[in-house]
Amino acid sequence: MLYYNYKIVTSPEMGEIITAFLGQLGFDTFETTEKGVDAYISNRDNTKAVQEEVERLKEQFNFEYDVEEIAEQNWNAQWEASFKPVVVRDFCAVRASFHEPIPTVQFELVINPKMAFGTGHHETTFMVMDVMQGLDFEGKRVFDYGCGTGILAILASKLGATVIDAVDIENESYLNTIENAAINQVHNINTFEGTIEAIEGKDYDVILANINRNVILATLSELKSKLAEAGKLIISGFLKEDEAILRQACTEN
């Protein structure tokens, strides 16, 4: 998918405020820079209304910015050049097919990401895997919402889940999840391309939603409707500054 990078020049303090506003507009990735903050938004979400709102924020908070088009890249080629295995304590390890096996962990995942997101390097993916260590997946039904490479769905299967439904809006992620499941000899993941509406199943024992603040907030009531009584919903992919609004939304639901 094509992305745009809004390169914003501002102070660190103001950057945090601007980031909070941009997160509500559909920007889903942020990077602090020496000059301010880089904010990324997909071509699908970079509407005229969003562009006009950014201009309004510029006038309100007195910052400058440039917009840079980020072309689609072969992330796999870049990844192979720099990727090192990720080890989550003695629980699990994530490596590529060209790495040597890692025998010192309980579970080993082989992930070849191509254009999809989710190798364990990102803090949110790492943290969700770490949390999964303390959950009971044996015989459980699991929903991986925004599956990316399928890394969390695959780990859930290895932890004993019987049925896993995985969905992602990106075609690359849909295909990559299927491929990575086969590489890891996991055969109980039902993969769907689309939004949450593509999933008809209900009463999941565990829902893993490692996605972003806006999508979580927009679909929280639907996630609730799919969660079994006493089920576990794991949400991640948002900033520390968003914790209060996420807690409030979860309480309301």
Image: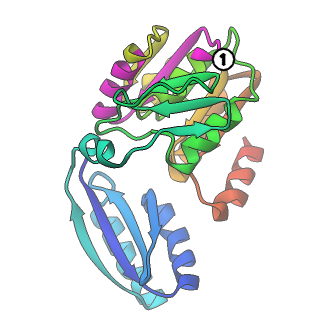
Q: Secondary structure at mark 1?
A: loop
Mark 1 residue type: Asp
Q: Is residue 57 visible?
A: yes
Q: Residue at x 39, y 31 (%)?
A: 99
Tell me which segment is drawn in magenta. Answer: 158-181
Q: Residue 207 colored magenta?
A: no
Horizontal side of 140 relative to 60 (left or right) equals right
Q: Residue 169 colored magenta?
A: yes
Against 172, is 163 above or below? above
Q: How is the image coloured?
A: rainbow
Against 193, is 120 above or below? below
| Quadrant placement of the C terminus | top right
Against 173, is 153 above or below? above
Report crowding for label 1: few under 14, some 14 to 19, many 20 or more residues within 10 A (C-alpha). Answer: some
| Residue pointed to by mark 1 | 203
**Count of numbered tags:** 1
Horizontal side of 15 relative to 27 (left or right) equals right
Q: Is residue 222 visible?
A: no
Q: Identify the image quadrant of residue 164.
A: top right
- Measuring from the top left, give residue 91's x and y in whole percent: 66, 29
Against 190, is 168 above or below? below
Camera-nearest residue between 142 and 82 = 82
Q: Residue at x 62, y 28 (%)?
A: 207
Horizontal side of 129 relative to 136 (left or right) equals left
- Measuring from the top left, give residue 209's x and y in whole percent: 57, 37
- Measuring from the top left, give residue 71's x and y in whole percent: 19, 55
Q: Residue at x 74, y 26 (%)?
A: 135
Q: Residue at x 28, y 31 (%)?
A: 171
